[in-house]
C-alpha cells in the first residue's frame, strides 16, 4: 500500500453517507470485518480538469489482503462513489475474494493479456462460489453486466461478454471464443491454479487471433469489481510506487476507516516477509469416539504433480500401446453400458410447441394493449442436450502402493501396485473420454492431518494421452499415508455444480495414517465422507486393486463396509477392469 498523504478533505463517512452500512452488511454476509478507506481523489494529484474526470471514471476499488504492514484486509473505495447499490456490489465482491480467494500468486511469465484473463476468471470463480451459498447475490451483481453481441468483438468487449455468460444463466453468447472460455471454466478445477491454466489456453487463442490489447489503458469492467492487484505477489523487479493510495482518514470514524492504532500504509511494492504456504482447503473429520465432526481438522494442499523422468513417461506410453486390446474392450463396454444421458434445455422461443414461454406471453399481452402486432413466438423451444458424466479419479499414492502387484496370471507380475493403479487411471480416463464423458485424475497422500497432499494429474480439459498428462502421471511417487476422508471431501468440493458428478477411488487398501492408532477411526470417517458426498448428489465408488494376500482381503472388507458392497469392487488384474469399472460407474 502507498503511504497516506496529509489531507483536510472529508472522511469516507462524510463523502459517502451510503457507505455507513457496509461494515454490518459484510459481517451479516460472511462474518468478516475488513477496514474501509477511500482512494485519493485524482484532483489531489495536480491534474487538469479533463484528466481528473477521466481518471475518476477509471478508478476501481483496491483490495489489499496480504501486507506485512497492515494485517487487517483493507478495501479502498473511490471517493466520488455515492450509489448505494454500486458500493454494496463492490464490497460484496471484494469480500467474496476474502472468503474464497487463495494466497497471492507469482506472476511468472504470464503476459498482460493472460493477467487480465486470470483476473476475469478468478472474479467469476469467487462470485460463483458466493452465489452457491448466497443466491441473492446474483441479483446484486447482474444489473452491472450489460455486454452482449452489440458490444463489439474487441478483447475488452469479449471479456465482458465472458463475465456475463458466466454470471447470467439466461444469457448465451454465440461467439466461439466466449463459448470456449465458458466451457473451459466449467471443466477446470475451481481453484486459482485451474483458472490460471484456462487463462493460458485462452491467451494463446488471443495471440493467434491477433487481437490488440493496451495493458496501460485496460480497466476492469464492470465498475464494481476491484483491480485484482491482490491476486499477485510482490514483483521484486517492479519500480517503487510513488502514487498515494489513500487519503488521510479520520481515526474517530471507527470501522469505516480502521482504528487509530493501525500503522500507516506503505508502498505496494515494498519487500515483505516470505509468505508461508497456506492450505488450499481445511475440512472437518468424523471422530467416532465423540460422535462428532471435528471442525477444521484436516489441511489439504493442492498442487500440480511434478513431471516424471523420460523413462517413466516412455513406460506409460508403452503400457498404453501394450494394453491396446484391453483399452478397446473397456471403450466398447463403456459405450454399451454407460450411455450418454440427455436433459431438456430451453433454447428460445418458437411459433409452435406444447408449453408456453411465460416472458413471451407477457410481452404479447403488452403489445396487444399498446395496439401493436404481438410476436407469434410464444412457445418454448426445448432441445435435448447431452449431459456427460464428470468423473474424478482419486489415485492412492501412499507408500503401501510400492509393494509388488502379485497377480496370479498376469504379464505385469513384477510391477508395483502404484504402476498398476497409474495404468488403470490412464485406461479409465482414455475410455471415458472416448465415450464422451469428462474425466479428471488426482493423486493423494497424507502426512498426518496437517498435510494432506492432492496432486493434479489431469484436468477435465486435458486429454488423457497428451504428453503433459503422461508426464504428470509418470511423476506420481508413492510416499506417506492414506487419509481418504479428507481427499474425498476435497474431490466432492471440486465436483460441486458439475453434471452427473462421480468420484472413483483407485486404491490398494483401507485408510491409514501415522497419527491415528485406532483402526476403526479413519474407515468410519471415510464412511461419513461418503455419506456427505452422496447427500450432495455426488456418487462415490471404489476399485480396490488387491495384492493377493490375506491382509488385502480383510482391507477390502473394510472398504466395502465404508462404501457399500456394490460400490467397492475388487480388481485382481487389469483384465477385471472393464466390467468392474462399468459396475462402479452405473451405480
Image (spheres, rainbow, N blue to C red):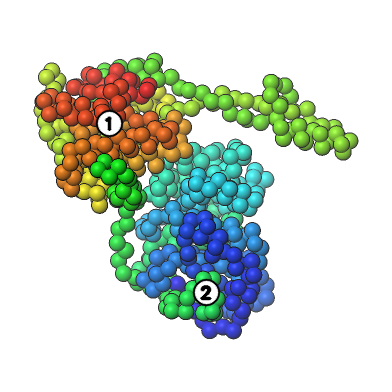
Residue that carries the numbered disc 1 in the rendered image: 562
Between residue 190 and residue 193, name the one nearer to us.
190
- Residue 572: percent from left, percent from top: 18, 22
Taking the spot 12% from the left edge, 34% from the top edge, the residue there is: 403
- Residue 578: percent from left, percent from top: 29, 19
Quadrant in the picture for residue 271: bottom left
Between residue 321 and residue 252, name the one nearer to us.
252
Q: Quadrant of the N terminus?
A: bottom left
- Residue 248: percent from left, percent from top: 53, 80
Residue that carries the numbered disc 2 in the rendered image: 254
Q: Would you say residue 170 is visible in this rendering?
A: yes
Taking the spot 37% from the left edge, 26% from the top edge, the residue there is: 432
Nearer-N-terminus badge (2/1): 2
Taking the spot 53% from the left edge, 84% from the top edge, the residue there is: 6
Q: Would you say residue 300 is visible in this rendering?
A: no
Dot 1 alpha-carbon crowd within 10 angstroms: few under 14, some 14 to 19, many 20 or more:
many
Between residue 575 and residue 293, name the one nearer to us.
293
On residue 571, the disc is: none
Quadrant in the picture for residue 329: top left
Q: Which secondary structure, mark 1?
A: helix
Q: Quadrant of the C terminus?
A: top left
Distance Cα–Cα, label 2 vs label 1 = 52 Å
User: Horizontally, is 362 left or right of 561 in the view?
Assistant: right
Whether 396 is drawn above or below 339: the answer is: below
Amino acid at each position: 500500500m502507498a503511504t497516506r498523504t496529509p489531507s483536510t478533505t472529508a472522511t469516507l463517512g462524510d463523502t459517502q453517507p451510503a457507505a455507513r452500512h457496509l461494515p454490518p452488511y459484510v459481517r451479516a454476509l460472511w462474518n468478516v470485518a475488513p477496514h474501509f478507506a477511500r482512494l485519493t481523489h485524482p484532483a489531489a494529484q495536480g491534474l487538469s480538469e479533463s484528466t481528473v474526470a477521466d481518471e475518476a471514471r477509471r478508478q476501481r476499488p483496491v483490495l489489499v489482503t496480504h501486507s506485512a504492514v497492515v494485517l487487517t484486509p483493507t478495501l479502498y473505495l473511490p471517493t466520488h462513489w455515492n450509489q448505494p447499490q454500486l458500493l454494496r456490489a463492490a464490497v460484496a465482491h471484494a469480500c467474496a475474494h476474502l472468503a474464497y480467494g487463495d494466497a497471492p500468486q507469482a506472476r511468472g511469465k504470464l503476459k498482460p493479456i493472460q493477467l487480465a484473463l486470470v483476473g476475469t476468471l478468478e472474479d467469476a470463480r469467487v462470485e460463483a462460489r458466493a452465489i452457491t451459498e448466497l443466491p441473492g447475490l446474483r441479483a446484486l451483481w447482474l444489473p452491472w453486466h450489460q455486454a452482449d453481441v452489440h458490444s463489439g468483438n474487441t478483447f475488452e468487449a469479449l471479456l465482458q461478454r465472458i463475465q456475463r455468460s458466466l454470471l447470467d444463466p439466461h444469457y448465451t453468447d454465440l461467439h466461439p471464443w466466449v463459448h470456449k472460455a465458458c466451457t473451459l471454466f466449467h471443466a477446470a478445477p475451481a481453484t486459482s491454479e485451474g483458472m490460471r491454466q484456462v487463462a493460458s489456453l485462452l491467451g494463446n487463442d488471443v495471440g493467434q487471433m491477433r487481437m490488440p490489447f493496451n495493458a496501460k489503458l485496460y480497466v476492469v469492467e464492470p465498475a464494481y469489481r476491484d483491480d485484482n492487484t491482490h491476486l499477485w505477489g510482490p514483483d521484486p523487479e517492479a519500480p517503487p510506487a510513488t502514487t498515494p493510495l489513500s487519503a488521510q482518514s479520520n481515526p474517530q470514524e471507527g470501522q469505516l476507516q480502521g482504528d487509530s492504532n493501525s500503522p500507516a500504509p506503505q508502498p505496494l511494492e515494498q519487500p515483505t516477509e516470505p509468505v508461508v504456504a497456506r492450505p488450499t482447503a481445511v475440512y472437518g473429520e468424523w471422530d467416532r469416539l465423540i460422535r462428532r465432526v471435528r471442525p477444521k481438522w484436516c489441511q489439504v494442499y493442492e498442487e500440480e504433480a511434478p513431471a516424471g523422468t523420460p523413462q517413466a513417461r516412455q513406460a506409460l506410453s508403452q503400457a498404453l500401446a501394450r494394453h491396446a486390446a484391453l483399452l478397446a474392450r473397456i471403450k466398447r463396454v463403456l459405450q454399451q453400458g454407460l450411455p450418454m444421458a440427455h436433459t431438456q434445455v430451453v433454447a428460445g422461443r418458437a411459433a409452435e410447441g406444447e408449453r408456453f414461454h411465460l416472458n413471451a406471453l407477457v410481452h404479447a399481452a403488452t403489445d396487444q394493449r399498446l395496439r401493436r402486432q404481438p410476436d407469434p413466438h410464444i412457445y418454448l423451444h426445448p432441445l435435448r442436450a447431452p449431459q456427460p458424466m464428470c468423473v474424478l479419479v482419486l489415485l492412492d499414492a501412499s507408500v503401501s502402493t510400492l509393494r509388488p502387484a502379485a497377480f496370479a496370471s498376469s504379464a505385469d507380475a513384477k510391477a508395483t501396485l502404484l504402476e498398476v493403479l497409474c495404468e488403470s487411471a490412464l485406461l479409465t480416463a482414455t475410455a471415458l473420454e472416448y465415450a464422451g464423458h469428462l474425466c479428471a485424475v488426482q493423486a493423494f497422500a497424507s502426512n498426518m492431518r496437517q498435510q494432506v497432499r492432492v496432486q493434479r494429474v489431469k484436468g477435465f480439459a486435458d486429454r488423457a494421452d497428451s504428453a503433459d498428462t503422461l508426464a504428470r502421471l509418470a511423476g506420481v511417487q508413492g510416499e506417506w499415508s492414506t487419509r481418504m476422508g479428507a481427499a474425498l471431501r476435497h474431490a466432492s468440493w471440486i465436483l460441486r455444480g458439475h453434471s452427473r458428478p462421480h468420484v472413483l477411488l483407485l486404491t490398494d487398501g483401507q485408510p491409514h495414517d501415522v497419527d491415528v492408532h485406532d483402526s476403526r477411526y479413519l474407515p468410519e470417517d471415510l464412511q461419513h465422507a461418503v455419506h456427505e458426498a452422496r447427500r450432495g448428489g455426488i456418487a462415490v465408488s471404489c476399485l480396490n486393486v488387491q495384492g493377493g494376500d490375506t491382509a488385502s482381503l480383510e482391507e477390502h472388507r473394510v472398504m466395502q463396509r465404508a462404501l457399500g458392497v456394490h460400490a467397492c469392487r475388487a480388481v485382481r488384474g487389469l483384465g477385471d477392469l472393464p466390467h468392474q469399472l462399468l459396475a462402479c460407474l452405473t451405480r
